[in-house]
Amino acid sequence: MYSHSSRVTKINNKRIAVHGGEFFGSHVRLIDVEPSSPEFMTEIGSFKVQDEVSVHNVMAFGNKAYVAHYQQSVRILDISDPTNPKEVGRFVDWSPDGSSDEMFDGVFGIDVDLQRNRIYVANSPTGLWILDDHPPD
């Protein structure tokens, strides 16, 4: 597995790394990176969609992680319990029509503007997407 993107956030005063691997079988792993923890540098949780689709970039703020997940597009995870991350949002717009069947086709870039509640997404076949990050009413 190739380590591609990681972000560190604090959950309950504990530093947690949200790590995105790349290539076949890779997925999101949550790693305890709190030096005083007995689980320091240990994987404590994970999130996986399917083996054939890779993660590219991740961002994390507090108890939320945002994942650029190539053909599985955008996934938003609640990581308030880092041992059991839950998907709380997604936007999937990938279609094989007009795209290749390459593993690295689809969403490869993600940036989050917390003040404006926006998610900026770079998608290889379709370009830039700007998404609202508002919970449903």
Image (cartoon, grey):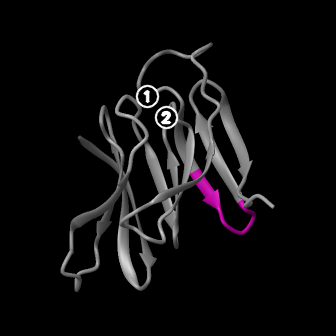
Which quarter of the figure has residue 125? top right
Q: Secondary structure at mark 2?
A: loop
Which quarter of the figure has residue 27? top left
Mark 1–mark 2 distance (CA, rounded to whole Å): 6 Å
Q: Earlier in the sequence, mark 1 or mark 2?
A: 2
Label 1: how many Cα within 10 Å (few below 14, some 14–19, many 20+) = some
Q: Amino acid at mark 1?
A: Phe
- Position of residue 30 relative to residue 55, above or below, is below
Q: Nearer the viewer, residue 51 or 108?
A: 51
Q: Position of residue 25 (x, y in %)?
A: 30, 36
Q: Position of residue 98 (x, y in %)?
A: 62, 13
**Marks 1,2: beta carbons within 8 A:** yes
Q: Which mark is residue 104?
A: 1
Residue positioned 60% across, 39% down in the render: 122
Residue 39 falls left or right of residue 137: left
Q: Amino acid at mark 2?
A: Tyr
Q: Quadrant of the N terminus?
A: top left
- Position of residue 119 relative to residue 64, above or below, is above
Residue 131 falls left or right of residue 31: right
The magenta region covers: 111-117
Residue sitting farthest toward the left: 38
Which quarter of the figure has residue 84? bottom left
Residue 95 falls left or right of residue 60: right
